[in-house]
Image: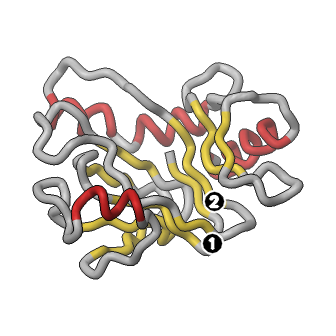
Amino acid sequence: EAQQSFFKIKKKVKTNQYPYYRIYDDYSLDKNLSGIEMTFHQDILTESIMRLIVSSKILEISKEILGEEIELELSRFHLTEGFSHVGNWHRDEKINHPMDSLQINIFLFDEKGLQVVEQSHKKEVAGGEEFLKRTPHISIDNSKWLNTGAGDVLVFDPAVLHRGISANPRANI
């Protein structure tokens, strides 16, 4: 049901019925969507997406790790459609930051669309961060592709070096 809801949400964006989205480099005549923003916006939130989120237990997971006082800073659908995508390596937090934030993804489909560098939340990668800024698509030797299934939940430190990369369609929250 959540997958079908996602397709309807995506159609709203494609037909200009929902304005909050991101596109990859626009090299097609169709919107090459990379993200649909504000997952909880009343114009796109469906009961089946909400059931998926509740059943994923992300609220409980977050409280267990961060404590009772938590807040959502960003919610979006990440997606890749008809074109393959190689994202930039990036971190969503500084190395060795206080443990006051998490990155949580709920996968809507089976995918192999996220690549991470293990232990990179504790130290810089060879060549340093400036090197990555100059060469954001470089292959990193000790990186790992994550295979995830529909309904899987991935929780990680936002300082982990990661990127979206996929030759196939994908979608996660």
Colour convention = secondary structure
**1 and 2 marks in contact (CB < 8 Å):** yes
Percent across and percent down for residue 85 are 60, 66
The residue at the point 26 percent across, 67 percent down is 117
Helix, strand or loop at disc 1?
loop
The residue at the point 85 percent across, 53 percent down is 30
Residue bearing mark 2? 80
Percent across and percent down for residue 90 are 37, 53
Please tell me how crowded label 1 is: few (under 14), some (14-19), or many (20+) other residues with Cα within 10 Å.
Answer: some
The residue at the point 48 percent across, 71 percent down is 112
**N-terminal-most mark, 1 or 2:** 2
| Of the pair 132 and 61, the residue shown nearer to us | 132
Q: In this view, does 90 lie to the left or right of 64?
A: right
**Which of the 4 quarters of the picture holds residue 169?**
bottom right
The disc labelled 1 sits on which kind of residue?
A: Asn
Residue bearing mark 1? 168
The vertical placement of 140 against 170, above or below, is below
Please tell me how crowded label 2 is: few (under 14), some (14-19), or many (20+) other residues with Cα within 10 Å.
Answer: many
| Of the pair 123 and 119, the residue shown nearer to us | 123
> Residues under labels 1 and 2: Cα distance?
7 Å
Percent across and percent down for residue 51 are 51, 36
Helix, strand or loop at disc 2?
strand
Can you name the residue that lies furthest to the bottom here?
141
Percent across and percent down for residue 115 are 38, 67
| Of the pair 74 and 88, the residue shown nearer to us | 88
The disc labelled 2 sits on which kind of residue?
A: Thr
Q: In this view, does 129 lie to the left or right of 82?
A: left
**Which of the 4 quarters of the picture holds residue 55?**
top left
The residue at the point 28 percent across, 81 percent down is 141
